[in-house]
Image (tube, rainbow, N blue to C red):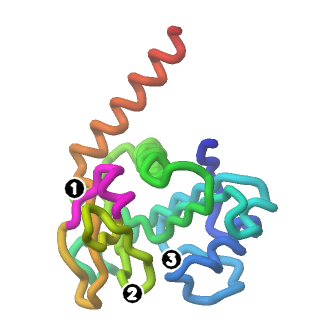
Amino acid sequence: MTWVESHRADPEVVPMADRHYNRQKIGSPQFVPPGRCHVLKIGTAEQLRTPGAGGAFWVTSWPFAEYVKHAWAGAWVCSAFRNEGAGVASDLIRAAVISTAEKWPEVPWKGMVSFIDPAKVEPRMIRGRETWGHSWFEAGFEHVGYTKAGLWVMQMKPAQIRELRQMDKLVKRLEKAA
């Protein structure tokens, strides 16, 4: 399945947004922080409403740097990503980053970041160690630090985003030629 562009108050996405750990107001019709945003979804209304039925949603926020209090001001921020069986998480993450770069071709100098709360996300055991954000590592993000509140910061740098977009364009051209 592929991402479909949505909007900050898509009623089909609200039930899944309500299941995301960072949701501020359960049931609120809007599930995106203020500012510029790029909202994506996968699945039917039923899939998005039903836990584990194959839906997913993604939000890229691009807050104006002067209103940001963390060290990555100016970066695109994945403010929500939830995958309930829509596909391989790292593939969905890469596809969402590409979609974001297509919407906003000028990649910010700090690239894209995502914040992971280790208290609310189940770790995966990788080589005998608990690891948070493994899908983000697989998608090409790096762990670059912590917020003051202790959230993990994952970052994809601008060069990686541009390279990912160029590879996607090449693949699409090859598929078209075949």
Q: Which residue is mark 2?
A: 119
- Separation of marks 1 and 3 at Cα, in angstroms: 21 Å
Mark toward the viewer: 2 or 3: 2
Q: Which residue is mark 3?
A: 33
Residue 119 location (% of width, % of height): 39, 87
Residue at disc 1, secondary structure: loop
- Most frequent secondary structure within the magenta stretch: helix
- Tell me, yes or no, whether the two marked residues, 2 and 1, touch with CB atoms within 8 Å: no
Marked residue nearer the N-terminal end (2 or 3): 3
Task: Please identify the quarter of the rendering in which residue 109 is found.
Answer: bottom left
Task: Identify the residue shown where x is 62% and y is 68%.
Answer: 8
Q: Is residue 88 above or below residue 171?
A: below
Say which amino acid is labelled 3. Answer: Pro
- Separation of marks 2 and 1 at Cα, in angstroms: 30 Å
- Separation of marks 2 and 3 at Cα, in angstroms: 22 Å
Q: Is residue 79 above or below residue 105?
A: below
Please provide the residue range marked out in magenta. Answer: 134-143
